[in-house]
Image (spheres, rainbow, N blue to C red):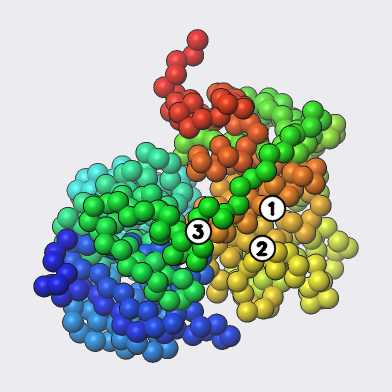
Amino acid sequence: MPDAAKAQPLIRMENIVKEFPGVRALQGITFDVYKGEIHCLVGENGAGKSTLMKLLSGAYTPTSGTIYVEGQPYKTLDPEISQQLGIEIVYQENDLVPSMNAVENIFVGQELVLPLGFIDKKRMLSLVRETMQEFDIQIDPLRKIEDMSVSDQQFVKILKALIQRSKVLILDEPTSMFNIEDAGKVLNLVRTISARGIGIIYISHFLEEVVQIADRITVIRDGESIRTYGNAGRNTPLGDITRDMVGRPVDTFYQREPIEPSQEQVLEVKELRLHRESPAVSFSLHRREILGLFGMVGSGRTEIVRALCGADRFFDGEIWLEGKKLQIASPRDAIDAGIAHITEDRQRLGLNLGMSVLENGLMVKLQQMQPSLLYDYKAHAPLVAPIVEELNVKTPSLLQEVVYLSGGNQQKVVLSKWLITDAQVYVFDEPTRGIDVNAKAEFYKQMTKLAKAGKSIIMVSSELPELISMSNRVLVVRDGAIRCEFSGEQITEQNIIREALGVIADE
């Protein structure tokens, strides 16, 4: 990183204010990034991180303030000008076209054309492969997005930004859906990009990786800049950062009280096979139990719970709930049986972004009531309001469209629609991906509350600390099969990782 006292910043955002109807999202923030610098931006969900970056990418217009790009002042940017100035952003949300392959997505809207007007697919593929080789990214560029893992889709998004040869690269939660190995690849990639003089603005809730990678760290809270840390020694105390983020010491966060599961078996999965050639999966779930499910990306863990919840068809096997054999061929079948599915993809599968907090909160409950073409949503507001308040969803009102909420608050709305139902089994698939420590604590409280009320929980998570602390048992999935079960003192990070990677030989 160059000497900031002598160099001119690539980007400087000065006294930035952004107001939405009823909300002052940013309150005079000043933020900058230099050539070859990794400047990490941290804060709770709703603090204003994404709003600040959307002003820089041209998606939003500042209410007031000035944006300087290499010394040139701008009162506002639009997406075209922002890109022309060399600013690229990789959003946390998936903005790829599922039916197109990686190359087509990377060049969509900017296709290379031959003299006669035909698309130069050969040259486009060549450029993508050159960039992949340059940055050591291993994906199939001709594979459709819908057939890729979530982590490979993220690499496509990063490739799409890199191929534009940007001067400033904004990465919004780039490792939030990755396993440890793939997250390490992203961090190495970020270091490589910055070493070539590109300024990087890095947003993440994983504070350990922030301290590991950042040259500077800026904390924002409630739309204000709280502090900027110099992190040349990669040793900024995590407790200090967290305290700045939430305004109180980290040791005040929620600690799960131990809950002893009953011996009553609520759910039993027998010889479940996702496809003709896939291994058979069998496991059980007890009342008041939180059962952890862990596996590396591509292990099959998500596919197992999607089959259980009716999101995917399965080839063979049986699912029993409270002694009754279920016929699950759709999500509606699972809902009717009493199985709730809090999905990892909140924007695509968990919410209708154009609908309000109230409408999304009632989405499942109203399906369980008398069918009708017209629902009076406002009449059912008393069902939603207490849960929204309990979850501390930051919204001006229940009528606010969820598209305008932060990612963490959107995830809380996903949870709220299931808490209103009287399900027996709650499947949490990466429930805290991309949300801050405070919002995570609220999710953990709700999971504990459900277990105490006699409900049963399956929790899929890539974050081992939360999986270890929350689970009564942990099942490790590898190559589509459950390889091991851990309980009690056996539930350790070392044991789980070794089984997930297949390091321990079968005896």
Dot 2 or dot 1: first in sequence order is 2
Left or right? Give the position of 35 relative to 43. Answer: left
Q: Secondary structure at mark 3?
A: loop
Circle number at residue 391: 2
Q: Residue at x 83, y 76 (%)?
A: 379
Q: Secondary structure at mark 1?
A: helix
User: Residue 445's spot in the image, x, y percent?
Assistant: 66, 52
The answer to whether marks 2 and 1 mark residues whose Cβ atoms lie closer than 8 Å is yes
Res 60 → quadrant? bottom left
Dot 3 or dot 2: first in sequence order is 3
Residue nearer the viewer, 175 or 8: 8
Q: Residue at x 77, y 44 (%)?
A: 452
Res 291 → quadrant? top right
Q: Secondary structure at mark 2?
A: loop
Amino acid type of the residue that numbered disc 3 sits on in the rendered structure: Pro
Distance between mark 1 and mark 3 Cα atoms:
22 Å
Q: Is residue 189 visible?
A: yes
Q: Which residue is mark 3?
A: 249
Circle number at residue 446: 1
Q: Is residue 492 above or below residue 13?
A: above
Q: Residue at x 88, y 63 (%)?
A: 370
Left or right? Give the position of 61 relative to 191. Answer: right
Left or right? Give the position of 396 relative to 449. Answer: left
